[in-house]
Amino acid sequence: MRLLIVEDESSIAQRIETTCISDGISCDIAEDGTEALEMIKLYDYDAVILDLMLPDINGFEVLSRLRAIKNGTPVIILSGLNSTDDKVKCLTIGADDYLTKPFSKVELLARIYAVIRRTSGHFSSVINIGPLEIDIKRCVKIYDVEMPLTKKEYSILELLALKKGTVLPKEAFLNHIYGGLDEPEVKIVDVFICKLRKKIADMTGGLNFIETVWGRGYMLRDFEDAAEHAPVNTLMVS
Ligand code: CA
């Protein structure tokens, strides 16, 4: 999961960043509105934490411009402005949530997860696909047994689960993991997918949930489809 923090006060930006990183969420920071808009157009963030009082264009304007170009990235306003008018204005022009400063770390995290869950069409923080249970708080279980995953493997599985049934190009995975910074070659995605498939197969008696769509990318299958594609001798086990 990757967030953009738009905040001109560096101490606050760092506090938000530390909170997110402690929960395994990667972050980028933009110090003004112009930089924020450029970064959001370049990278595919899971959510944006947006301050309203910024040195150049204010947060209201950033949000309006974003929605005007049909960019639907979830936006959580985090502002010192606490009037009902400001809250209503933001929610009306397309904010997904509004939190006031000073903020509590646990509340911020809870709101981030809630917003991402809602905007990705999931109603709980856990996505279930047959025996596979992916908690967007970074825990994956198969048949109730925790699956050992590296941070990058988790990120790939998380993206596949959030966009289940959609073919994702390899660049989308790179963007999700590295956010456009120091990206390795796209072939690295095949390596991660291969490792993930092996771990899932080892724990499910040979099931493969991750489909290769030639020339296009990868897609997470539903459980029934995965079972259908399983080798015959393993179907009796599962
Ligand atoms: Ca500010």
Image (cartoon, grey):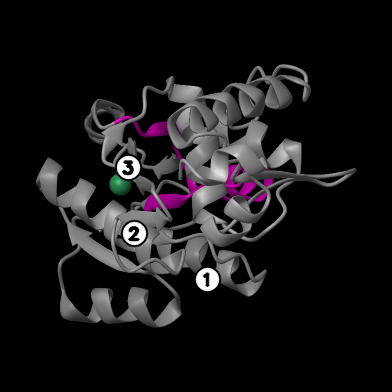
Residue 45 point in image, percent of width and height: 53, 47
Left or right of 40 in this view: 27: left
User: Can residue 172 be seen by looking at this rendering?
Assistant: yes
Q: Nearer the viewer, mark 1 or mark 2?
A: 2
Left or right of 20 in this view: 55: right
| Mark 1 surroundings within 10 Å by alpha-carbon count, few (fewer than 14), some (14 through 19), many (20 or more) | some
Residue 202 point in image, percent of width and height: 49, 26
> Any magenta on residue 43?
yes
Label 2 element class: strand
- Which quadrant is the C terminus positioned in? top left
Label 3 element class: loop
Q: Nearer the viewer, residue 197 or 162?
A: 197
Q: Label 1: which residue?
A: 64
> Mark 1: which amino acid?
Ser
User: Can residue 30 be seen by looking at this rendering?
Assistant: no
In the image, the segment drawn in magenta is 24-49
Q: Nearer the viewer, residue 206 or 70?
A: 206
> Mark 3: which amino acid?
Tyr
- Which quadrant is the N terminus positioned in? top left
Whichever of callouts 3 and 1 sits on the residue coming sooner in the sequence is 1
> Any magenta on residue 35?
yes
Under 8 Å from ligand 1: the CB of mark 1?
A: no
Whichever of callouts 1 and 2 sits on the residue coming sooner in the sequence is 1
**What's the mark number on residue 76?**
2
Count of numbered marks: 3
Q: What residue is drawn where x is 64% and y is 71%?
A: 70
Q: Label 3: which residue?
A: 143
Marks 2 & 3, CB-CB < 8 Å contact: no
| Mark 3 surroundings within 10 Å by alpha-carbon count, few (fewer than 14), some (14 through 19), many (20 or more) | few
Q: Gap in Å between the C-alphas at discs 3 and 1?
A: 45 Å
Label 1 element class: helix
